[in-house]
Amino acid sequence: MTTPSAGLPAAASDLPFDSLPLAPAMLDTLRQLDYRTMTPIQAASLPLALAGHDLIAQAKTGSGKTAAFALPLLARLDVRKLAVQAMVLCPTRELADQVTQEIRRLARFEANIKVLPLCGGTPMRPQRDSLEHGAHVVVGTPGRIMDHLQRGSLVLDELSTLVLDEADRMLDMGFHDDIAFIASRCPSARQTLLFSATYPEGIATLAARFLRTPQEVKLLEQH
Ligand code: ADP
Ligand code: MG
């Protein structure tokens, strides 16, 4: 991915993925992707997220945060129910596209999982058509997600997992109010996972508003 560590494997912990309560097919997919051991942020956050906790997770870029939220949201999907059950908010279209690709890779164990990117800079109409055909997971930027919510083309009644990825950057870009609007359209009985590379003051405020008794996982820079 286009991170400073692009092309380098994320630093590993020595914990294998099969120590987690994941379906055998998902463990097979991880083996096929050559994901052998968890990265430190994955080892710290996956057991909590898979147990259903809300989470504030902080670790530097390139540490494997995508799989740390993608595996829990995939584990909870009911594939037979074609409704948006998980949503990932990202600050930019580029990041949303990367997250979409990573979730699709991790979702290979089940051919029918539909992951749909919803970002600005592309026409609304094809996105509305895709939403009408149904998606299990949507990944998008706050502005375009809001647009779909206001027009009624995106319904979040069945949402069980909300992810705020790169939350620090979303705050820097002035998305606080959009996030608040979007969260108000999500069921309150949901899991919310907040991922961030840094921990500015605004993150605590955001978490206090939108997360429920979150567990905090912070990894300090490792050199
Ligand atoms: P972050 O979101 O923290 O910046 P990413 O989720 O983009 O990091 O992951 C960085 C890179 O590490 C990606 O190329 C991803 O495929 C790879 N990666 C993530 N977890 C593992 C793992 N457990 N084993 C091997 N590679 C991994
Ligand atoms: Mg990331």
Image: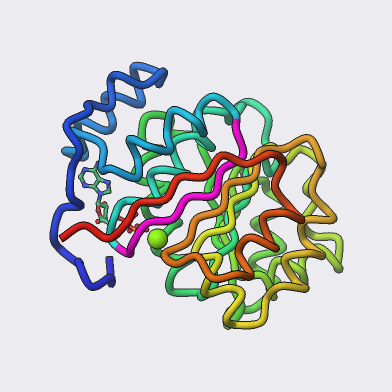
Residue pictured at 70% horizontal, 66% vertical:
145
Relative to residue 215, is residue 32 drawn left or right?
Answer: left
Q: In x, y percent, where is residue 196?
A: 47, 61
- In the rendered view of the protein, which quadrant contains the N terminus? bottom left
Residue 130, given in percent of the width and then of the height, sits at 64, 57
Is residue 168 shown in magenta?
no
Quadrant in the picture for residue 45: top left
Residue shown at 69%/60% (left/top)? 129
- Name the foreground residue: 104 vs 59: 59
- Above or below 221: residue 13: above
| Picture quadrant where residue 181 is located | bottom right
Q: Residue at x 68, y 29 (%)?
A: 81
Q: In the image shown, does 47 or 28 lie closer to the viewer?
A: 47
Where does the image place residue 16, in percent across and percent down from the top left?
Answer: 22, 26
Task: Answer with left or right where residue 35 lies relative to residue 96.
Answer: left
Quarter of the C terminus within the rendering: bottom left
Give the camera-side residue of 119 and 51: 51
Q: Is residue 60 magenta?
A: yes
Q: Residue at x 64, y 78 (%)?
A: 123
Quadrant of residue 160 within the rendered picture: top right
Task: Give the magenta part as a residue range.
Answer: 53-61
**Which of these two is toward me, 87 or 121?**
87
Instruction: Estimate the x, y position of residue 44 in percent, counting from the top left.
Output: 37, 37
